[in-house]
Amino acid sequence: MSAPAVPLGFRDVLRIQSVRRLWAAQIVSVFGDFLAVFAVFSVVTFELHGTPTQVSMILVAFLAPFALVSPVAGVYVDKWNTKWTMIASDLIRAAFVLVLLFLRDLWAIYAVLFLLSTTSCFFVPAQTIAVRVLAPTAGLLAVNALMSQAMQGATIVSPGVAGLLVDRFGASSCFLFDSLSFLFSASMVATLTIQRQGAPPGPGRASVLRSFMEGMRFIFTHAEISFVMLSMATGMFAIRCFGGLLSVYVRDVLSSNSTAFGVLNSCVGIGMILGTFVLRRVSRATTPRFVVAYGLAGMGLTVLVTAVFGTLTSTGAGMLGLGFCAAMVMITTHFAPAGDAARTPGPGD
């Protein structure tokens, strides 16, 4: 019996040229995505003076495909050529972002964002397949962590950069960078050799529906799993609702501009990083349910503080606290095993 493979670290997997190129494509593309999304918020809020409903529709248009299209997209992507699916998705998204340069009609902007996210629904599962093919089994954890860190880094850096770019050069600069980031990603993917065995035939429609119903029944008949799922959904819903209206709050209450909007969004990302580090100590002193409860209560408190004081300083503190408490909810529900109410493992366990 062979001994289990020793897990590879970050340096080990980055020595693999194909993984390094895929990671570089991820960093540039994700950073560009965040720039474009915040640029759209800035245009609708500060240039078109959109109402709260009109600004909220940006998130609706951008996130709806991930709920409606993603479950179906994965079935088809598994049958398609992985490399060309990723390249085609990048090129299509580059074209859609360029269209945003010329749009100032709200419904047209919503439509382009919907199509942009729909295309991403096909890219994401293809990228997941590429990671499994290119990375050795012992390095999958490290590669996935690198991809996650690219996302977290973009969450922190890109909002502030986007705000500065919009103020100095206009929203078009963000759209141009995002389009170029997709072209860069496509060029990186084009250099990769992604060979995998043919996927088995996908399940039929009845089988997909049956599996979905069985999964939902399993979730809602197990109290611990229901708690995890509902807690994550509640936390994400709160973050998205507040984030979707933050630009309006900055404009109407703080009487500030897109730079302040970008910096405040960066504060949420910084708070989440701080919360992740602190969670290790907190998790050893209480149970998962209490950690999640404290996190949700803290999120409500930070939003209340932000609303009551209505200053730039208090809002910045509130955003840091919101990200900090959101990390308590998201990390705990992600790492806590179902049925284990005795302890909460930290992210490094």
Image (cartoon, grey):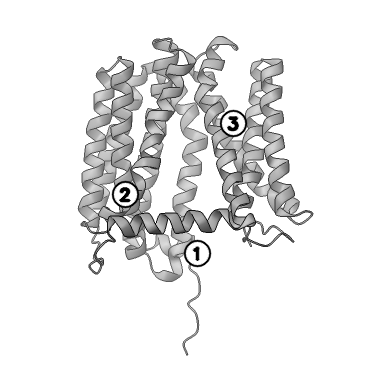
User: Mark 1 or mark 2, which has the lower sequence index?
Assistant: 1
Looking at the picture, tell me which residue is in the foreground, 56 or 257.
56
Asked which secondary structure carries label 1, the reply is: loop
Quadrant in the rendering for residue 222: bottom right
CB-based contact (under 8 Å), mark 1 and mark 2: no
Q: Tell me the residue that label 3 is attached to.
A: 267
The type of residue carrying mark 2 is: Val
Residue 54 shown left or right of residue 241 in the figure: left
Looking at the picture, tell me which residue is in the foreground, 255 or 68.
68
CB-based contact (under 8 Å), mark 3 and mark 1: no
CB-based contact (under 8 Å), mark 2 and mark 3: no
Residue 186 marker = none
Looking at the picture, tell me which residue is in the foreground, 104 or 287.
287
Residue 60 higher or lower than 236, as above or below: above
Residue 143 higher or lower than 45, as above or below: below
The type of residue carrying mark 1 is: Gly
Q: Position of residue 37 (x, y in %)?
A: 40, 29
